[in-house]
Image: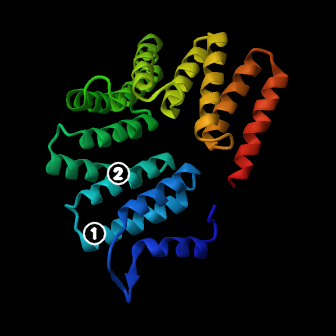
Amino acid sequence: MFGNRAIRALFLEPYFNVNCGKVMAIDTLNLARLFDNFMHVCDYESAMAVARNTLSLLEDELGHDHPAFATWLLKAGSLLRLAGEYPKAEPYLMTALELRERELGPGDPAVAEVLNELGLWHACQRQFEAARTRHEQALAIRQGALGPDHPDVAQSLNNLGLVRADQGLPAEAERLYLRAMAIQEAALGAQDPGLATQMNNLAFLCFDTGRYQEATRLFRHALAILRRTVGPRHPTVACVLDSLAALYRVTDREPEAVRCRDCAASIRSSWK
């Protein structure tokens, strides 16, 4: 999507409101929507172009201390993590953390948002103890500032579950996933895509521990929610289909495995 650089530049131009070389205004709300649209379809190159241009404009017009600057540092760092550019992501994330702690205080939920992202960054590099520490810090802030039943608390519990699963502690991971799912469903309903993500993680745990029937049920349930909420051709749907294909293959259900694999391949080809 928007693969041509000239088209991408034209698409970005109205949001920067440039007149005779001078920035007149920065429409950060619409820039954030544009960034999120690119992220939704996994167009990381276009999303990074938005983030870098926005950071440059914010730095020139509003300075490092403006809250929006830390927000866009976090967006850029998160994107670089997703793209596997871990060394490049670190300075964005650490600067965002420093700015938010200084401006808002160490117990603000906005600080927890950066700590959560740092936890994911560490986990992607298999630095599981560091990841656990970051997620526990984020969880403590969120529980204190937002209460125990907030969806952000569910996010931290889910991410802690991922770390504990990677550390070979499936019982603890399952306990964390189940707590996260209960909070998420109570807060946002049974059709929330965040709930589907947590359900998918629990399904992986069941798969890894040989509970194939339960894993199948959870993968299918997550898939149904995602198809209804983010759409049947979303890349996340393809990921769940790949998981189901692997499960069907292990349980000698090759025709179903092939159907899932082919459906996932078709979805991916439509986003190229």
Whether residue 1 is situated above or below residue 144 in the rendered picture: below
Tell me which label, 2 or 1, sits earlier in the chain: 1
User: Where is residue 21 shown, x and y percent of the image?
Assistant: 37, 86
- Name the element at disc 1: helix
- The amino acid pointed to by label 1 is Glu
Q: Which residue is at 63% across, 43% downward?
A: 235
Q: Which residue is mark 1?
A: 59
Q: Which mark is residue 74?
A: 2
Give, as a three-letter code, the residue at label 2. Leu
Model colouring? rainbow
Q: Residue at x 22, y 61 (%)?
A: 66
Residue at 53%, 23% (x, y): give it: 199
Circle 1 residues within 10 Å: few <14, some 14–19, many ≥20: some
Report the quarter where the C terminus lies: bottom right
Task: Pinpoint residue 184: horizontal percent, then vertical percent.
Answer: 42, 26
- Residue 121: x percent and y percent? 40, 41
